[in-house]
Image (cartoon, helix red, strand yellow):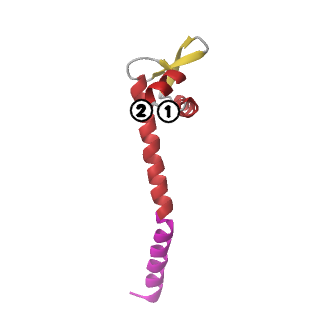
Amino acid sequence: MNAKNTMDKDAMKQLREARRVWVENARQSTKTQNQIISQIKTQLADAAKTVPEIAQAAGMPASQVLLYIAGLKKYGQVAEAEKDGDYFKYRLTS
């Protein structure tokens, strides 16, 4: 093995080591987001619900649920259903 290959391998090893914490944090963040999305979808599996109803049933802040609902709506996973008082109800699209 020539000296350049050895230096390249060493540089890659150092780079992986330096980014290990960042990669693990990103992995954990993704896992948490997937769990939250799953909780929201579970709440919507049986019937359409408002953001406050979802938040109460899932034990999450309504502001957090609203952000996730907005994202799920943007990507077509949930849709607005009928209005219940001041709030729209949301339902799964598929």
- Where residue 78 appears, as percent x and y from the top left, is 49, 25
Q: Position of residue 75 (x, y in %)?
A: 52, 32
Mark 1: which secondary structure? loop
* Disc sitting over residue 68 in the figure: none
Indicate the position of residue 35 as horizontal and vertical percent values.
Answer: 42, 39
Q: Which residue lies at the image location 48% right of the left edge and 85% below the top edge?
A: 4
Image height of 58 relative to 19, above or below: above
Pointer 2 or 1: first along the chain: 2
In this view of the protein, which residue sits in the foreground, 30 or 59?
Answer: 59
Q: Residue at the spot x=49%, y=77% of the render?
A: 11
Indicate the amino acid at tag 2. Answer: Gln
* Residue pictured at 44% horizontal, 51% vertical: 28
Is 14 in the magenta?
Answer: yes
Question: Is residue 94 visible from the viewing direction of this image?
Answer: no
Residue 48 appearing in the image? yes
Residue segment shown in magenta = 1-20
Outermost residue toward the right in this view: 86
Q: Main secondary structure of the magenta part?
A: helix
| Element assignment for label 2 | helix
- The image position of residue 61, as x and y in percent, is 54, 32
The residue carrying pointer 1 sits among few (fewer than 14), some (14 to 19) or many (20 or more) residues within 10 Å by Cα, namely some
Q: Is residue 83 above or below residue 29?
A: above
Between 61 and 92, the one nearer to me in the picture:
61
- For the residue marked with disc 1, what is the amino acid? Met
Residue at image mark 2: 39
Q: Are marks 2 and 1 in contact (CB under 8 Å)?
A: yes
Single out the mark in the foreground, 2 or 1: 1
Q: Which residue is mark 1?
A: 60
Question: In the rendered image, which quarter contains the C terminus?
Answer: top left
Query: Alpha-carbon distance for marks 2 and 1?
Result: 10 Å
54 above or below 3?
A: above
Other-residue count near label 2 (Cα within 10 Å), few / some / many at <14 / 14–19 / ≥20: some
